[in-house]
Image: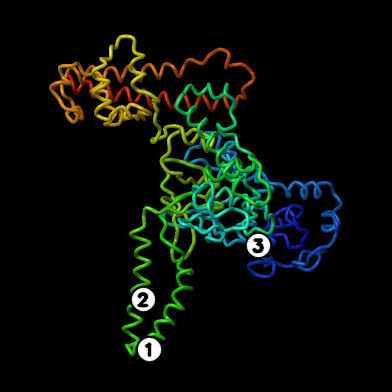
Amino acid sequence: MLCVCVNVPTGFDRRQCAVLPASVVHAELLRNGTLPFMSITAGLPQLGQGCSRSTLAECVGHKTTQHVAHFAYSRHPHAYIRLGKSKTPCSAQSIGSQAAVSTSEKDFQLWWRSADVKAALSPADFEGLRGMSADREINSGDTIVSLPRTAALVVTPKMKNPFPDEITAAYWSQSQWFEKMAVMLLHEKRKGTHSAVSGYVEQLPADFDTLLHWSDQEMQLLMYPHLLQQVQQQKESWHQYYESVQAATSGPPMSEAELTWALECVRSRAFSGPYSGPPIKERAKAVVPFLLTAAAYTQWAHLPLEQILNGAIAAVLFNIIYDTLLSRKLRWFALCPVIDSMNHLSASRNEVAYEYFGDRFSVTAERKYNQGEQVFITYGLQSNDKLLQYYGFVEPKNPADVYVVPDLLEALRDLPYLRIPEEGVQAAKQAGLSVALQKVALTRQGLPEKALQAVRMVLAPAQLLEQHSAADFRQQVDALHEESCLQALKDVCLSLSSQLTRIPAKQSDGAISRRRQDLAKQFRQQKSRVLQSCCKSLENQIRKARKQ
């Protein structure tokens, strides 16, 4: 915090607002050279005047421990909003309470206003879950949030190393986008109040409660082998990232815990979209000398100025069109303050967009919101596997949820009544379909076509294998055989669903927090519902096969 005396806006507690976060003061001075607040508060020094008093109590003139405690508390990063992501999302129509807005949230609001972030939102509490509520009535098509690119942390394709004195060029060119962004985030955090995004960095969660921090015993509560494998791979790969960064950096030493924190911030908060090339302002800087050169060329080549300029403008427009239309496979990634404080809902159609000519990120309302109503955003169609692993929560009735079977062939072999002929296994292997039986994502609609083709071959008797090619098994080749394949898959789903209800007695002791037990239970319930829906879909296919 900087001890700067300013006016207190109406409706705010003077004791909480008499001192501003250093990040807010710094951002305002960078933008305007002054602090654009209202009139002078009675009894305080002139507006924006730096105060040399040694303590907050001396500056404000109230020697109370409340002021000093506020001063000390505000100097540290706080867990803000995203900590609530670990809880079950509220209903889409819930109304929030702003009565419990914390000091850190108020500081964050002051910062985003100083950084030219325009938002019709405020932090609010929704039945114990932090989220963003509508400040006013928002109509469909209204801008909910808009922030300049300078208020965000952005990684673009072929982005130059922003700090070559600290990170080697080789590491920067080979690292993945989230590694780059994590290093950038730590760099901004170490800059402290000198960072243009310090107000955003200060309010990021101090820690996370994702699966990365669950014990082996707690992970067993999920009863889901695929996610256990994914988290183990995450731990190993993130440790490798740390070793790579350590070997490539010549700057201040970085601990593995620091990098892990930054990676978790990035993986749980970053958005992405099609990259449309450099901002229009950067292009304009290049266009001016380009046009001047073109004008000079007219003198040397004795060609009409109009002809030269037409060619120059056409070249510039072609580059813009190429970037925006032909390079859609390239993507940007961004940490967008305020936007990343909105909770996720798969049904929401609010998405982050990049305004090319305005050089801003924005979110537009897809429907009307009443004042006080929680405003959601979609993080994209993600299964509960990803939501729990990287965000720390489970979404009920998630339309993108799946149940991943690590090895479907082994799951079929576990059925006590089923005999799997070796001829079918070899035939599927020769056809290159063995991989289709690995990490099979079962959905509410059934299983992937490739996996079903592989199951048909694996369970096919020798006679059918002799009569049909591998391509024939893309569809039903025999009614009785099709029914037996679908019934076996249905029984696999039933078996997996029943396993989700078997929690070992030793796992139910008091060593595991109630919150993690509840979260694991929610996860198992959602996986069971996916399997039950898959069973119904397979049952419908069985009925269809019987009619043929």
Q: Amino acid at mark 1?
A: Trp
Rendering colour mode: rainbow
429 horizontally vs 399: left or right: left
The vertical placement of 506 against 225, above or below, is: above
Does the residue at mark 2 contact the one at mark 1 (Cβ under 8 Å)? no
Label drawn at residue 313:
2
Q: Which element type, helix, strand or loop, lies under badge 1?
A: helix
Residue sticking out furthest to the top: 417
**For marks 3 and 2 on the same chain, the one whose residue lies earlier in the sequence:** 3
Q: Secondary structure at mark 2?
A: helix
Viewer-proximal residue, 394 or 92?
394
Name the disc covering residue 429, or none: none
Q: Position of residue 340 (x, y in %)?
A: 53, 48
Q: Which of the marked residues, 3 or 1, is nearer the chain's N terminus?
A: 3
Per the model, the C-alpha gap separating discs 3 and 2 is 37 Å
Q: Amino acid at mark 3?
A: Ala
